[in-house]
């Protein structure tokens, strides 16, 4: 290990640059600007890699994780504040933040415990519909839809996990695919849930504050999506911190061991089913929480929001970002949500594009764009050797 | 002497093949017993039946006076039996430390609250465990103890074996089952590893070892007694010198004269 302490400056500079770039990208209007910014990013990453700048930033991030994480949150807030009046930009950001939460859930399932889940959108959908049902049929405070949506997803997941545990590899994947399709069909035929037309989700009202109303401070007005963005960011921070701690604990170690070698794990006392259930439930809970909030943001949900293709998008985020890498999927989720919205050229073809992208990644970088680093239980900890 | 491990009439069939045929083996506390026999004679199968990976069709396995026949691998491990595998089964993408800690599963706190919320308590346990792992690895190899944070994939074969044995030893088992630890290593490396095993035995008095090995030099050097299997049957048992003289054993290894 290098004895020279690494400076936090490259990490901070990295976040600052990324923030500026995000603002420019989200604010870009013409296709020419968007294309130019993309080319700039590609050039910067390539050049930065050549002269060793990316390595320095990476080392700096690894050595100063809490600083970097905090700066990243500030970066998101700064971007949102600059674009505070642009509804569409704020909506895109909120969507990205929520998909990050869902993708983190999938990371725990697939990346850590090795439990495939091709029904991610269904669990997001369970959260959405829970929010719709609660606000529509019950007098419960609307903020409670988040935890209840999470619990509902976890509960449904605990039924699905039974056939998943009894099958392996491709068959387990097929079980989850079947479940995703079943879920959508169920929504389409169920009249209480609005059938194919879908359902309205009432806004969140917290302490008398309606989240759908714009925030006004004197002459300063921000988008009516802004409250949702803040709540989504808070949810992401909590989810990210828990996933990070989970990874850096004996639980994360057990999940990895179960994924890598079930026989050896069993011979050292690991209860394979128990760990898979834990990872699956944990992941579904956060997908459900994110889903509930997503429902409020959308305001209106229909079965078509939760197709197999949407589940594939979540899987492709995990593959793209780096299987098991929390920061990787966070960045990848931002890409996958925002890129097609800005680049209209690819909007129609985005599912085809994701498919091509996933194939390319699996061929040339099977560990993802940002491969998962070795587990360090404590940030910047290099224990003494005897 | 009451045996620590006793198999009586142990039988295991795969379809029409009788992999283990009424095996009787008793291992006393503190013994080092060699398990030898030609390829396919049922040595690894015996380990797999004892550790609960395969189910016995007949017979019983007793460990520390408790019947563990048909117990799950998890329960056998909790009872105090740890093993290594013939073909190295390590989590290669994980660090050396992680690999060893997998073996300490029964002594680690896996509570959600402890792991996710009580980070300072977790950190204290982590530091303690790191020192413990480093100390154990240092018995085998000092340089290796300084490489706990490296990925296991980067280690040479002999060091992987050492880590595998440490993974089995970290939870302080009463019985250690070594499945051909010298497989894929040179003579020199094998000799080194056997020295390590003898040192460990001295450090952990009372540790009982059953070792499967093809290197007869190893068997001769470290075991007090050996059991010879052929076609799933026990054909001979005794000190290495006696066993090596046995005509049945010679026939099993060299073919009929």
Image (cartoon, coloured by chain):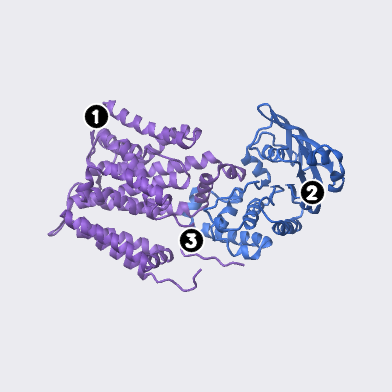
Chain colours: A purple, B blue
**Badge 1: how crowded within 10 Å, few (<14), some, or many (20+)?**
some
Residue A53 in view here = no
- Marks 3, 1 in one chain: yes
- Residue at 75% from the left image edge and 39% from the top image edge: B65
Residue occupied by mark 1: A196
Circles 3 and 2 on the same subunit = no
Q: Do discs 1 and 2 belong to a common subunit?
A: no
Tell which subunit mark 3 falls on.
A
Q: Secondary structure beneath disc 3?
A: loop
Q: Quadrant of residue B189?
A: bottom right
Secondary structure, mark 1, is: helix
Instruction: Point out the tag, 3 or 1, that comes first from the N-terminus.
Output: 1
Across and down, in percent, residue A192 comes to 27, 27
Please state if B68 lies on the left or on the right of B108 as rendered: right
Residue B169 vs residue B144, the one in the foreground? B144
Alpha-carbon span between mark 3 and mark 1:
49 Å
Chain ID at mark 2: B
- In percent of width and height, residue A262 lies at 56, 42
Neighbours of disc 2 within 10 Å: few (<14), some (14-19), many (20+): some
For the C terminus of chain A, which image quadrant? bottom right
Q: Quadrant of residue A183?
A: top left
Distance of mark 3 from mark 2, alpha carbons? 41 Å
Q: Which chain carries label 1?
A: A
Residue A219 location, x and y as percent?
A: 12, 59
* Residue beneath disc 3: A378
Residue depicted at 20% across the width and 56% down the height? A34
Question: Considering depth in this image, is A175 or B3 the residue closer to the camera?
Answer: A175
Quick one: which residue is furthest to the front in this view? B257
Which numbered circle lies on residue B216?
Answer: none
- What residue does disc 2 label? B31
- Is A150 placed above or below A377 here? above
């Amino acid at each position: 290990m290098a004895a020279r302490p690494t400076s936090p400056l490259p990490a901070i500079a990295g976040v600052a640059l990324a923030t500026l770039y995000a603002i420019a990208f989200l604010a870009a209007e013409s296709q020419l600007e968007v294309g130019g910014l993309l080319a700039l990013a590609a050039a910067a990453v390539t050049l930065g890699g050549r002269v060793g700048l990316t390595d320095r930033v990476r080392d700096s991030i690894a050595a100063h994780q809490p600083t970097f994480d905090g700066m990243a949150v500030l970066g998101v807030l700064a971007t949102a504040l600059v674009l505070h009046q642009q509804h569409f930009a704020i909506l895109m950001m909120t969507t990205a933040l929520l998909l990050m939460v869902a993708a983190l859930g999938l990371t725990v399932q697939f990346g850590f415990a090795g439990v495939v889940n091709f029904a991610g959108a269904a669990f997001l959908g369970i959260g959405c519909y829970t929010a719709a049902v609660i606000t529509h049929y019950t007098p419960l405070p609307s903020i409670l839809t988040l935890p209840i949506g999470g619990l509902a997803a976890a509960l449904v997941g605990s039924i699905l996990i039974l056939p998943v545990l009894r099958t392996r590899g491709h068959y387990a994947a097929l079980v989850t695919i079947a479940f995703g399709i079943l879920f959508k069909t169920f929504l389409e035929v169920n009249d209480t849930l609005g059938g194919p037309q879908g359902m309205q989700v009432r806004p969140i009202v917290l302490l008398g504050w309606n989240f759908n109303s714009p925030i006004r401070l004197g002459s300063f007005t921000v988008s009516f999506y802004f409250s949702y963005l803040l709540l989504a960011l808070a949810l992401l921070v909590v989810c990210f911190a828990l996933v990070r701690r989970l990874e850096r604990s004996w639980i994360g170690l057990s999940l990895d061991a179960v994924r890598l070698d079930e026989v050896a794990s069993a011979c050292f006392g690991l209860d394979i089913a128990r760990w898979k259930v834990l990872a699956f439930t944990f992941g579904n809970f956060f997908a459900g929480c994110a889903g509930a909030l997503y429902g409020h943001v959308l305001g209106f949900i229909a079965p078509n929001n939760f197709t197999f293709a949407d589940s594939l998008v979540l899987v492709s985020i995990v593959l793209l970002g780096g299987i098991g890498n929390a920061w990787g999927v966070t960045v990848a989720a931002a890409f996958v949500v925002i890129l097609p919205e800005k680049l209209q050229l690819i909007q129609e073809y985005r599912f085809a594009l994701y498919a091509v992208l996933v194939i390319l990644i699996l061929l040339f970088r099977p560990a993802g764009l940002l491969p998962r680093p070795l587990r360090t239980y404590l940030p910047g900890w290099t224990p003494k050797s005897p | 002497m009451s045996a620590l491990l006793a198999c009586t009439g142990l039988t295991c069939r795969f379809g029409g093949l009788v992999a283990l045929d009424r095996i009787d083996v008793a291992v006393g506390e503190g013994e080092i017993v060699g398990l030898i026999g030609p390829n396919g004679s049922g040595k690894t199968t015996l380990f797999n039946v004892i550790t609960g990976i395969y189910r016995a069709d007949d017979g019983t396995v007793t460990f520390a006076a408790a019947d563990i026949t048909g117990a799950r691998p998890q329960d056998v491990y909790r009872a105090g039996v740890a093993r290594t595998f013939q073909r190295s089964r390590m989590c290669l993408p994980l660090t050396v430390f992680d690999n060893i800690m997998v073996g300490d599963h029964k002594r680690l706190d896996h509570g959600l609250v402890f792991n996710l919320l009580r980070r300072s308590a977790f950190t204290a346990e982590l530091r303690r465990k790191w020192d413990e792992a480093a100390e154990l690895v240092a018995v085998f190899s000092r340089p290796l103890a300084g490489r706990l944070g490296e990925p296991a994939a980067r280690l040479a074969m002999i060091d992987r074996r050492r880590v595998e044995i440490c993974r089995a030893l970290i939870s302080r088992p009463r019985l250690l089952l070594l499945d051909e630890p010298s497989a894929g290593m040179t003579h020199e490396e094998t000799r080194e590893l056997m020295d390590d095993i003898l040192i460990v035995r001295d450090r952990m008095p009372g540790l009982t070892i059953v070792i499967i090995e093809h290197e007869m030099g190893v068997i001769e050097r470290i075991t007090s007694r050996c059991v010879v299997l052929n076609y799933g049957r026990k054909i001979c048992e005794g000190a290495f010198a006696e066993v090596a003289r046995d005509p049945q054993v010679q026939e099993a290894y060299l073919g009929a004269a």
